[in-house]
Amino acid sequence: MSDADPGRGRAVLDAVAARMLDATVLQRLGIATASTALALAIGLVAVALSGYDPVAFLANVAEGAFGDANAIARTLKFTTMFVLVGVAVAVAFRAGVFNIGVQGQFVVGGFATVIAILQFAPLLPGGTVGGLALLVVGTVAGIVAGGLYGALPGVLKAYGDANEIITTIMLNFIAVGVVGFLVEGPLRGEGNRAPNTERLPEYVQLPPVVFDSPDFSLVGLAVALVVVVVVSFLMVRTRIGYDMVTSGHQAAAATFSGADARRTVVTTMTLSGMVAGVAGAVFAVMIQGYYSDPSGVATYGFDAIAVSLLAANNPLGVVPAALLFGGLDSAGTHLSINSDVPPQLIDGVVGLVVLFVAAPELFRMAARRAGLGGENR
Amino acid sequence: MTGNQATPAVRLDGITKRFGDVVANDGVDFTLERGTVHALLGENGSGKTTLMSVLYGLYDQNEGTIAVDGEERTFDSPRDAMDAGIGMIHQHFQLVGPMTVLQNVVLGHEPTDRGLVDEGSARAEIEAICDRYGFDVDEHLDERVVDLDLGVRQRVEIVKSLYRGAEVLILDEPTAVLTPQEVDSLIEVMSDLAADGRSLVFITHKLDEALSVADEVTVLRDGEAVGTVDAATTTEQELARMMVGREVLFDRRPRETEPGDPMLRVEGLRVTGDRGLERVSDVDFVVREGEILGVAGVQGNGQTELVEALTGLRPADSGAVVFDGDDVTGTSRRGRIRGGLVYIPEDRQTEGLVQDYDLVRNALLGNQTVEPYVTRGLIDWPAVREHAADIVDEYDVQPPTVDVEAASLSGGNQQKFIVGREIEHDPDVMVAAHPTRGVDIGSIEFIHDRLLDLRDEGLAVLLVSSKLEEIRTLSDRIAVMYEGEFIDTVDPDAVTDEDLGLLMAGRRPDEDTAVGEGGPAVADAGETGPTTAPDSEVER
């Protein structure tokens, strides 16, 4: 039995929710900044209580996130990845499809990129021209593989009524397992002690621009930003995007308007997987230079869900959200090397920041769902 | 609960409940006598559930009083109402699927023994209730609710209310989810409960069910109580007329043109509803250019499924739907929109508008394949904005701006926007389902005028409405739908309200009530074409 109690608590919640929902973009940025500061302050208390120097900790955070060119390159490297996987998640969530399988699509896409480049390398000339051609081949392979791996749960949902949350989680395990098996045995590079594929040829890499970093190139970040622009355009300015977003808002209205609900689900999952595939390709080419057992690889595809939620599933909002996550990860990496603060504590502080920054957005989502904040929300 | 026989179990006096500008209940009086079944009859949106939700403590009334056993009460929550012996069984059952029947029944009212749930005494008590009324629920006590049929689940809900000491039981559309056999057994249960001294409110829109079990029937229409009648002396057609009412409407506008060629033709259409039952059974009809065919009938007789099959939202099992000579039976919704079919949907809140889109984005809904708004898949938002502004302007949508969310408009203005958007689509065929439901009187007139304009411009219009007067005012012919069939097609000028009431209650026509012109035209127009001009020129 629903027990509606229109009491005072509800009225207070209503007022707060209305205030939160009406906040402008600038106010939201202000709230996010204040949240970060507050979370850091609380984190520093915890650091101090644990017997470490909070001032040094804070200095290390700043230094690790943007202290020098290396730190900035590292922050931007993480940001690039978070932008791409974040957009992949946002596309699906926007359309009301819960693609938890971005990690799997990211792994399959990256692996396909490496395999395609290794396969085609002997057939093409070396040097800049060959490198460029192989980059294109690899990226296309990553997009296609990621897209197909996303389309699969899309088809299962659309035509088999299989819950996408469950199927995509299962497909994550399958992706990691199968790719892990392949790099372990059949596709392991000759003479490799670790379970890795062969290295990509030297000439297949993103050119260093401004930053002279082994695993970051501004070109990679540029690719990510282009993806953001393309996806935003697609969502806002095209029929496909309108159908997708409308399906996410109000499925019955989308059906009324002639959008084919099943096809929209498949399109959404495919697009989401394609973006995850781009993320995989950038990861393989820019960061790794080969493909290793994915069970040991960074789990960008899971962090992506937090990035997307923080951005309210808006592809443009993913950029600042990814920058925050990138900075925090970079600071965490720096801290774990340059201080004796235990990694658990670092993760705790990072977690606090994410929690605090995400809380207002989660509150907004919950308020909308619960119908708080006055009528007609 | 004491109270002697003379005091009614529940008395509602002048209940008014408003939601924003919408008046859901307008000064409704309702008296439930002890030991009786009282049917609350009305169309969807007539305010039945709202009225009972006020009694059950879900809503606070704006005006009026509630008396239980002659004592004035205010209920702040369902818990208060339950404590006063009132139980409500909702349309959607409030059961926890993975838990057992026993757990569901005692949930929140568990008998305890030194802090532990006393399952034994709960079991005994439930069995006693079941024995008393001959329920089979005790056979399922340890089964999970998800594994049970809907009919059994409903009895679990009833047992749950009785277990909590309900003297007054409100059943909200309890037959909607049941098979005919389950309906029969529910009706038996209701009679037994009443015979045992409990008082029941039976919310329904089905005439025969109301008459088969109720002692009294109160009819609601547009939030007002039309009247209370004794079930023993009333008839289905009287109830049908009370439900759909007789509003003071406008004179019919004389037509200036004659209907032309057949534009929409339906042959042998069969459609299955959501619950796997056939809801449209072998329906044939033709709507010609410049003609409005009204489909009358008590709600739930297959009108919704018919409309969905015509508009491409639901597949047909067999038969054909033909627009202007093209068979579109297998064509997608989008294909039919492209082919010139527009649709004013029954449910504007969930289908016709995206509530949290502004009117610009809503103006594109259904227009995704129309140039210049979308060219080769690319949306031209400035053009859409201009279009939205034109609709708001020409169809008098208030407030006169496109930068508001659809949800913030009143029902009448939402509907005017939808009507405008669909008409501006430049259609050949219009399907309008309850186009003025829940709409204020000014907007009703406006929408009626637009539909008549469409007729005069030579469109084929299929109008489904549960408002008899609307159907009579607008239609050139009236088809009456009953249990999935068109049982007759009549001339609105020649038919009386009594005849329509009879037809809507399922009485098949005698020779002299069927109207010659409409009948043969339906059967023959497809083959012979409009060689003879119809002679039913309307002048009144």
Image (tube, rainbow, N blue to C red):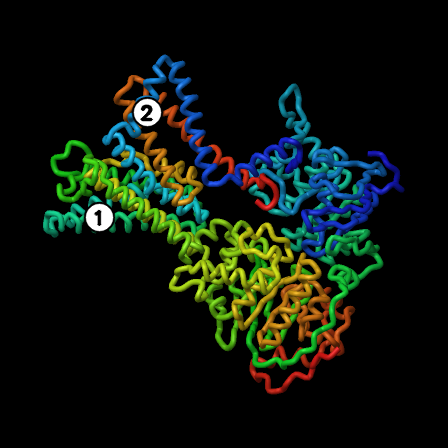
Q: Residue at x 60, y 50 (%)?
A: B408
> Is label 1 in contact with label 2 (beta carbons under 8 Å)?
no
Instruction: Assign a secondary structure to mark 2.
Output: helix
Nearest the eye: A180 or A304:
A304
- Kindly identify which chain the residue marked by label 2 belongs to: A
Quarter holding the N terminus of chain B is top right
Q: Give the foreground label among 1 and 2.
A: 2
In the image, is residue B18 above or below residue B244?
above
Residue extending farthest to the bottom is: B531
Place residue B503 in its image quadrant: bottom right
**Image position, residue B477 (x, y; %):** 67, 74
- Report whether B96 appears left or right of B68: left
Question: Residue A61: which disc?
Answer: 2
**Image position, residue B194 (x, y; %):** 79, 45
Quarter holding the C terminus of chain B is bottom right
At label 2, counting other C-alpha atoms closer than 10 Å, the crowd grade (few under 14, some 14-19, many 20 or more) is many
- Kindly identify which chain the residue marked by label 1 belongs to: A
Q: Amino acid at mark 2?
A: Val
Instruction: Assign a secondary structure to mark 1.
Output: helix
Nearest the eye: B276 or A190:
A190
Mark 1, residue position: A138
- Report whether B300 appears left or right of B360: right
Question: Residue B304: which disc?
Answer: none
Q: Residue at x 45, y 63 (%)?
A: B373
Q: Amino acid at mark 1?
A: Gly
**Image position, residue B520 (x, y; %):** 65, 80
